[in-house]
Amino acid sequence: MELFSLLLQTPTGAPAQQQANPMVTFGGIIIMVAVFYFVFFRANSKTKKKRTDMLSGIKKNDKVMTIGGIIGTVTSVRDREVTIKVDETTNTKMTFTKDAVRTIVTEESDLTVEGS
């Protein structure tokens, strides 16, 4: 047991351990916050802008998919509402807020979901 306690003791001639400069530590934290801001918030704002542009560009005869998975053709667009024809045979139409539209379906997209 005595040998173990001797091993844990530091030699008397050992140099004192230097403490980190508080300005360097504070600067490192500021740099980490800045990187976090640019990675997270800037990417999020670009996604929001892309979605806003997509919603403002909805027009009649666009094929859209809602957040609930309903696929239909836009029959009318108002300020905050979109009317979608979901069944051609019975002429069934549903009205949604524009925010309920997930994506505009095109041949290229093949029902892939944007923003998810």
Image (cartoon, rainbow, N blue to C red):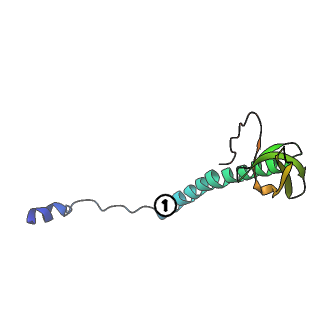
Q: Nearer the viewer, residue 50 or 77?
A: 77
Residue at the far top in the pictured view: 108
Residue at the far left in the pictured view: 2
Name the residue located 62 percent from the left edge and 51 percent from the top edge.
39
Q: Position of residue 67 (x, y in %)?
A: 71, 53
Tell me which amino acid carries mark 1: Thr
Number of numbered discs visible in the structure rendering: 1
Pointer 1: what residue?
25
Q: Position of residue 46 (x, y in %)?
A: 72, 49
Name the residue located 21 percent from the left edge and 62 percent from the top edge.
10
In this picture, is 29 found above or below 51? below
Residue 65 at least partly seen: no
Secondary structure under tag 1 reads: helix
Give the quadrant of the N terminus: bottom left
Name the residue located 77 percent from the left edge and 37 percent from the top edge.
106
Q: Is residue 30 left or right of residue 47?
A: left
